[in-house]
Amino acid sequence: MAVGGGYLGMRGSGARLEAMEPGWDGGMADSARDPRGEFAANLRAAQARIFGYIYSLVRNLDDADDLFQQTSLVLWDKYNQFDATRDFASWACGVARFEVLNFIRSRGRDRLYFSDDLTLSLIEAHVSLKDERLEDRRDALSGCLKKLRGRDARLLEACYAQTTRIPEVASAWGRSTHSIHNSLRRIRRSLFECVERTLAQEGLA
Amino acid sequence: MSERDPSADELLDLIDLYLSDLLDAESFARLEGLLGESPAARSRFALYVNHHREIEFTARASRAADTALDRLASSEGGTSPKGRRWLGGRGAWAAAALVLVTIGLAARFAPPRVELGRILGLTTAEPANVAWLLNAQDCEWSGPEKPGRDMRAGKTLGLERGLAELEFDRGARVILQGPAELELLSGSSARLIKGSLTARVPSQARGFTVLSAGGKVVDLGTEFGLSIDDKGGTVVRVFNGEVVAYPLKPASGLTLRQDQAARLNGRTVALDTAPAAWDQARYVRSIGPAAKAHARSITLDFSRPRPGTLADGRGQGVGFTHRLPGTGALLPRFDANLFLRSDTPALELTTTRSDLNTQDRMNTGEYLGFRLAELGFTGPEDFEISATMPRIPGLDVVGQFGLYVGPRSNQNIRGGLIRRPRPDLYRVFLVNNNDGMDQDIHEVGLTTAGDDLRLSLRRLAGRYSLVVENLTRKSSSTLAIAHPAFLDHATDLHAGLFGANTQSELSRTLTISEVQLTIWTTRPDSPTMPSVRKPS
């Protein structure tokens, strides 16, 4: 760019990062001195919540996955600005929010998306989910899935195993969109109740 | 889940529809409303969405496992596992889990694949800069992020003052006028959070988009100005070419052509058929050579009458040209509370009962001053008003006098001396008044009746402060309070002095020996002297 743009336009982060050493990721004991190790540990601890937050806004696993990758890059890029006294997951969700909003804008108006304000206030709800609790729920869910009737299991698979929209499933199954939705809702709800029941029985709820 | 709460059921129903992408606009708004008003609903939402995500992960992982097992079975010549359900027995899961590891999926359907190597710099892929700073004049940047080498999407530039010209990757050029905040979104888009900008968009950059809280403006090859007003509304003005302005909610856009302006308030976009005359003037469309600040001053020493200005009881013009809007409406044209003493020389101002706090008796309140626009003020300029007051009188408790700045009686900042309940003692104070109510008051020190004072209320670098010099004791105090942001975008400000026997009928007479108003303007073409108001 003209008039000083050449200097101002250069990015510096490439130069900031030193070449990766093998095994850097294993030495968590060194994390206090190793920003990469510290960052990796932070990201791992918060990734389920960050991903959940992104997914809750875009409702598509592939999009959420891309956005999560993108967010992770930005997080590392900005990690030197992270205030260690703050909660990493909150900070990360704040960054993720921006990536999501950009994505939403780039998608135009093909779907309804939450307002900017609501995306902000949803951060706290996601961040305050406990990782252990999510783990417990995951374990309980796998038990509950095994109890599903065959037809319900097949419907879940049809709807979720690939990026398929409900109207397409409805058409393939020869049913109306709302009928498929109602079945899905019933299945999700019964799984949700099953998870809650399991956790309550295990004294984890 | 043993007890059913109907509203909880409604919430889950709405979330189900949301996740299935089957919500209509009305139900979507209902869901937004429920989530917006209740933290508990948001927690429920987060939990339920995670539940949904787990189901989806599990299904995905299972499909991947089936595919992998199929491959294994066929390569080993074993029985095809076709027909096995992903919700099958424990053994199938164990096998699937093993395969998942080998094909790179996390064994426990762990959520995202985190490519830490890529993130931590093992590859050279870098998000690119989306804009460059071309030119900067008198810039003072706020916040941790300043323009520089990192100008990627997501960066927010906070410009406290000055002019900054950016070039976006696709070629659009933007001049940001401080105070303003701009978020870089992409090589062809940005979000104006506050303040004003102008954009010049060459043909290859057509489609350059500026978002704001009020909507978005898409350029069709043109030059336009955009600003956020003090109520958060967005105003767009086209200088050349065409833009399309869209409100936030899905709706068709409004095409604007040369010299047209429109307001966007989020829900609607409306053509502004009578844009204020100052509207065009406030946009800086090019950065010229660094402008020198010109001080424009007016000084009243009260040594002679100034015809055509506010008149005292005998009809002698005292020099002030305006009253603070909202005050003095019932005061006579020849105001007996004013007495021009050309011999001393000084102006004597007899206080009346009034109070800006609660807007008590504004019609007879004495708030004399100037209209800054008549001295070349357009909004961003700094200024100072000062007054010298010898031998200050003792007012009754909470009586007060001093200086003010604001567009009207119920929106201003004022400071000076306020009488506190000890004989002859004043405290120095500075206070914001918004919607007619005082807020953020700060009081310091003590001053005695009979002292000589000089007060100065100034705006420097956009920040207000009050300096009180005690000429008798050779001491001074400077006060600052919470910034009155409600004055930031006001372009029609008044500044002057006041005297009020607040909450008392006991009037006192103030002596003012000199008043000076100075505006530092960078516009040499501004008018040089105020035109005085014709007495009504």
Image (cartoon, coloured by chain):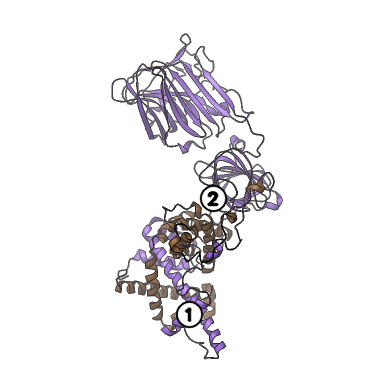
Alpha-carbon neighbours of circle 1 within 10 Å: few (<14), some, or many (≥20)?
Answer: some
Alpha-carbon neighbours of circle 2 within 10 Å: few (<14), some, or many (≥20)?
Answer: some
- Is A163 above or below relative to B84? above
- Is A162 above or below relative to B198? below
Looking at the image, which residue is at 47% across and 23% down? B386
Dot 2 falls on which chain?
A: B
Residue nearest the viewer, comparing B70 with B521: B70
In x, y percent, where is residue B14?
43, 65
Q: What is chain A's hue in the picture?
A: brown
Residue nearest the viewer, comparing B166 with A72: A72
Dot 1 falls on which chain?
A: B
Q: What is chain B's hue in the picture?
A: purple
Residue nearest the viewer, comparing B278 with B251: B278
Find disc 2 in the rendering and name its residue: B268
What type is the residue that disc 2 sits on? Answer: Thr
Question: Is residue A134 at all visible to an observer of this figure?
Answer: yes
In x, y percent, where is residue B101?
49, 76
Among all residues in the image, which is located at the extreme right?
B203
Q: CA distance from mark 1 to mark 2?
A: 57 Å
In x, y percent, where is residue A57?
49, 62
Find disc 1 in the rendering and name its residue: B98
Number of numbered discs = 2
Q: Secondary structure at mark 1?
A: helix
Left or right of residue B68, residue A201 in this image: left
- Is A178 above or below relative to B223? below
- Is B379 above or below relative to B228? above
In x, y percent, where is residue B482?
42, 37
Whichever of labels 1 and 2 marks the residue nearer the N terminus, that label is 1
Q: On the same chain: label 1 and label 2? A: yes
